[in-house]
Image (cartoon, rainbow, N blue to C red):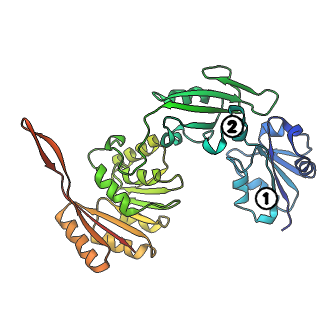
Amino acid sequence: MAEWLSIIGIGEDGPDGLSKASRDALSGAEVVFGGPRHLAMVDHPDKRPWPVPFSVAPVLALRGRQVAVLASGDPFWHGAGGTLAADLAPGEWRAFPAPSVFALAAARMGWRIEETLCLGLHAAPFARLRPHLAPGLRAILTLRDGAAVAELADWLGDTQAEITVLERLGGPRERIRPYPCDDIAAPVAVALRVTAAQALPCASGRPDTLFDHDGQITKRPVRALALSALAPRPGEMLWDLGAGSGSIGIEWCLSHPRNRALGVEADPTRAARARANAARLGVALDLREGRAADLIGALPDPDAVFIGGGCDDALLTALWGRLAPGTRLVAHAVTLETEALLAAWHGARGGTLMRIELAEAAPLGRKRGWRASFPVVQWSVTR
């Protein structure tokens, strides 16, 4: 199909800031879509606002007609461009990007953009910032509106940071001020320079104190060994069966920004606790409630699977038939019965069987002695 859709980036300077190619595409369009703010900037006989909730369906319904879409700055950086392109063939559309708010903010702050974290928090929770918080961080964050600046400052809590408020960048009403300030106008972004923060460790096996739990948690040293065996790679999906506190799935997600984890937990209280842990630590852990054996048939294919609790022969048999070749499987056992089960599966299917025995120094009268934990047997295998 011939090119019919123009995706046009527009800034706060309106049509005056558009290139000749962008203006030609706009004037040649039969229909123009955009947000109310963008549509108010242009003169066109057929202007249509995006539906609420947002959907690109009205644009796609006009396939074949000359259509233009207005988006803020660069349409492919937290804009509608990627959503539209996902449903189009390459020859159907053409993009006309303008400077993004991140580019404008970096230019105003004098920051190298390649050394600056850029996050769109206008439609995402502030917790997405949590894995990145560390002394020396420079970040540019787009926010929902002026009130969100104070909300972000409250959310940062004990984190010490300089906040610069950047309003209506690139237009005649542009304003740049240090926070605190009032009467903040949208569109708004903030430049954040962190001077002191409680940073999350980068290595797997984060402190147990990061996770709210009821005692059912894969402890830090064992969790580090589990993540090592699971071997997360960028963009992969994990099933965490018997998720408990969600610590394994959360650490999987923390290993790379594109990693995803799907947890299964039969206990509703633990499932809610795992969701809360994930939300607080800024990762998107998808938690399903129910028995793993009942749910795995409908779950999206994983790259790796961890079984931390409730492992039995029926589940392993179902998994072996369900998983695609190349899927990595790691299972832990703490009871003699489950240990014998994993030993049998190791004998039949191969892989690696490891017994983990740990002891920690603890008070013993007026002195110290070794307090042993229950041994854990780990079976890891590639399907």
Where is residue 167 drawn, in percent x and y?
Answer: 71, 29
Report the quarter where the C terminus lies. bottom left
Residue type at numbered disc 2: Ala
- The residue shown at (83%, 68%) is 1
Where is residue 93 drawn, in percent x and y?
Answer: 81, 59
Q: Is residue 27 left or right of residue 142?
A: right
Neighbour tally class for label 1: few under 14, some 14-19, many 20 plus, Cα within 10 Å: few
- The residue shown at (59%, 27%) is 163
Q: Nearer the viewer, mark 2 or mark 1?
A: 2
Is residue 118 visible in the rendered structure shown here?
no
Where is residue 291 drawn, in percent x and y?
Answer: 35, 61
Where is residue 373 drawn, in percent x and y?
Answer: 18, 52
Mark 1, secondary structure of its residue: loop
- The residue shown at (78%, 54%) is 59
Mark 2–mark 1 Cα distance, whole angstroms, equals: 38 Å
Question: Which residue position holds label 1?
Answer: 61
Q: Earlier in the sequence, mark 2 or mark 1?
A: 1
Q: Quadrant of residue 305?
A: bottom left
Residue type at numbered disc 1: Ala
Is residue 343 visible in the rendered structure shown here?
yes
Mark 2, secondary structure of its residue: helix
Question: Which residue position holds label 2?
Answer: 106
